[in-house]
Image: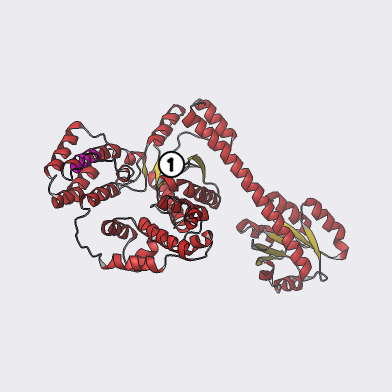
């Protein structure tokens, strides 16, 4: 019953009554006393600064009595639950207050702790029920808004005028000129759905925390559009607001789903100013077609959509880089250095479309495998095709170039220390930022070093260790599957089962039955 802590305001002009209530062990009732007032006017002033969950008020008071206060509270702060303090002579007033919306009453001097506990629990039940109703109503409204939005953008079943009219009916007024933003999560495809639910919850919480300064809509799992109320014309101010939103979401999501196998990153695209109705659809489509977020890591995480645009790779530029790659075909060391430095700089400077860069690399890889390694039938590298960043793509390629070279390699101290921390704390909710703090490096630098020296991302390395330990526990312990998941630091049984099956080809239960 006491899962939700209640904030309580006492209102009474009699000092002894306030002192008596002040001595109550409020914490034992799942409540906290947040203030006192001598009359209704003081109570209303208090509520304009901080709205309590419960107001316990006397009926007969100077300046503004309890009946007037109850009327004003229900008018201005309808979510507040009111409990009246009454003397025998005030019973008829108490009944009037209950008609106005007061929840219950206590008889002065005669009330007992059990009665107070009972009315507080009654208030808690009403508050939780109303919160749930509001949440369901908001969720239904958001579903309606998102459906209208997707009909317009994706299905093309609404004209611009129809879209604007229906959005207004659903509570979103588009007043030109305005800007909108698109929040995108970059993560492995198989992890998007696990993150989507957590992100939707966080966005809703943030929307309420910021008193609905923005409204978010779902485009598809992992992509969300933000409609900002009264967005600043100053782009630097708007960018700062969106950076704060991104920072909050990024930190919370990394804490809540630290067990996710793939690396998680969030990007926010800001639209150009939409000056009039006829520009709306083209502006939305421009944002919708933008992809490959963060492929070039030097990108800002929050920026105008222009920053996420790429240049097409001309035939002349393609031939130029193909010639340089071919010249180094048989010199593995120089080739590795070229890819990690010159090729990286060339791609970053020119910002070519990632799919075109991957096409050149895939073709060159095929030639290299045939000519140097003598492999007639070369399979397409799925890992190369799915690389989410330029660094990742180059790493996949150079790792393949240097496979089976029998080079003895010793990790640098910070990486050895990070690995030791991971191995010793595998059952905890480890994050890159927490480990980087332990080893004295920035998260970004540790992430890059980790991939360079282990051949895997931080999350991939940790997942491999977790799966190895899970296999051991399933073979050599009587722990239930969900207990195995918790033991290796993955609190989501469903996610553990999906990950384990991907890693071994079997569900945990089937693996144990073998």
Q: Residue at x 29, y 44 (%)?
A: 384
The x, y position of residue 60, in whole percent, is: 80, 62
In the picture, residue 19 is in which quadrant? bottom right
Horizontally, residue 34 falls left or right of residue 338, namely right
- Residue extent of the magenta highlight: 361-369
- How many numbered marks, from 0 up? 1
Colour setting: secondary structure
Query: Is residue 221 in view from this perspective?
Result: yes
Residue at label 1? 182
The x, y position of residue 149, in whole percent, is: 51, 34
In the picture, residue 456 is in which quadrant? bottom left
Question: Element type at marker 1?
Answer: strand
Is residue 453 rendered magenta in the image?
no
Q: Is residue 229 above or below residue 435?
A: above
The x, y position of residue 121, in whole percent, is: 72, 61
Mark 1 Cα shell of 10 Å, populated few (<14), some (14-19), many (≥20): many
Q: Is residue 356 above or below residue 488?
A: above
Horizontally, residue 375 falls left or right of residue 112, namely left
- 16 or 51, which is in the foreground? 51
Q: Residue at x 29, y 46 (%)?
A: 296
The x, y position of residue 27, in whole percent, is: 66, 70
Is residue 362 rendered magenta in the image?
yes
Query: Is residue 79 in view from this perspective?
Result: no
- Image quadrant for the N terminus? bottom right
Q: What secondary structure characterizes most of the magenta part? A: helix
- 24 or 414, which is in the foreground? 414
Residue placed furthest toward the front: 514
């Amino acid at each position: 019953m006491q899962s939700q802590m209640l904030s309580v305001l006492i209102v009474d002009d009699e000092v002894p009554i306030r002192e008596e209530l002040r001595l109550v062990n409020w914490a034992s009732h799942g409540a906290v006393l947040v203030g006192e007032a001598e009359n209704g006017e003081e109570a209303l002033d208090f509520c304009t600064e901080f709205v309590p969950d419960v107001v316990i008020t006397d009926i007969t008071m100077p300046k503004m009595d309890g009946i007037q206060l109850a009327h004003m509270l229900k008018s201005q702060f309808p979510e507040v639950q009111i409990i009246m303090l009454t003397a025998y002579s005030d019973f008829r007033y108490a009944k009037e207050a209950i008609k106005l919306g007061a929840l219950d009453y206590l008889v002065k001097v005669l009330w007992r702790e059990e009665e107070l506990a009972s009315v507080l629990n009654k208030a808690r039940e009403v508050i939780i029920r109303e919160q749930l109703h509001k949440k369901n109503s908001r969720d239904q409204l958001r579903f309606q808004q998102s459906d209208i939005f997707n009909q317009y953008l994706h299905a093309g079943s609404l004209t611009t005028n129809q879209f604007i009219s229906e959005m207004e009916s659903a509570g979103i007024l588009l007043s030109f000129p305005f800007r909108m933003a698109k929040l995108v999560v970059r993560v492995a495809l198989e992890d998007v759905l696990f993150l989507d639910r957590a992100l939707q919850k966080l966005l809703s919480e943030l929307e309420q925390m910021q008193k609905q300064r923005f409204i978010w809509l779902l485009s598809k799992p992992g992509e969300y559009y933000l409609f900002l109320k009264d967005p600043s014309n100053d782009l630097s101010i708007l960018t700062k607001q969106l950076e704060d939103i991104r920072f909050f979401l990024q930190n919370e999501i990394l804490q809540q789903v630290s067990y996710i196998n793939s690396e998680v990153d969030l990007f926010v695209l800001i639209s150009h100013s939409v000056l009039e109705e006829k520009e709306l659809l083209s502006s939305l489509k421009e944002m919708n077609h933008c992809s490959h977020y963060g492929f070039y890591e030097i990108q800002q995480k929050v920026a105008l959509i222009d920053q996420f645009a790429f240049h097409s790779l001309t035939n002349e530029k393609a031939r130029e880089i193909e010639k340089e790659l071919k010249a180094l075909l048989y010199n593995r060391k120089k080739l590795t250095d070229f890819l990690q430095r010159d090729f990286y700089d060339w791609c970053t400077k020119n910002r070519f479309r990632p799919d075109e860069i991957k096409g050149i690399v895939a073709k060159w890889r095929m030639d290299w495998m045939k000519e140097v390694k003598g492999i007639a039938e070369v399979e397409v590298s799925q890992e190369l095709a799915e690389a989410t960043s330029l660094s990742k793509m180059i790493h996949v390629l150079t790792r393949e170039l240097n496979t089976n070279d029998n080079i003895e390699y010793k990790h640098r101290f910070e990486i050895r220390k990070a690995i030791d921390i991971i191995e010793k704390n595998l059952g905890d909710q480890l994050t890159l930022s927490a480990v980087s703090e332990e080893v004295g490096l920035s998260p970004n630098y540790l992430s890059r070093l980790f991939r360079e020296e282990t051949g895997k991302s931080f999350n991939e390395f940790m997942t491999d260790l977790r799966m190895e330990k899970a296999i051991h526990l399933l073979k050599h312990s009587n722990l239930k599957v969900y207990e195995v998941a918790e033991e290796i630091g993955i609190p989501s049984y469903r996610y553990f089962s999906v990950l384990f099956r991907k890693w071994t080809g079997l569900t945990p239960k089937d693996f144990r039955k073998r």
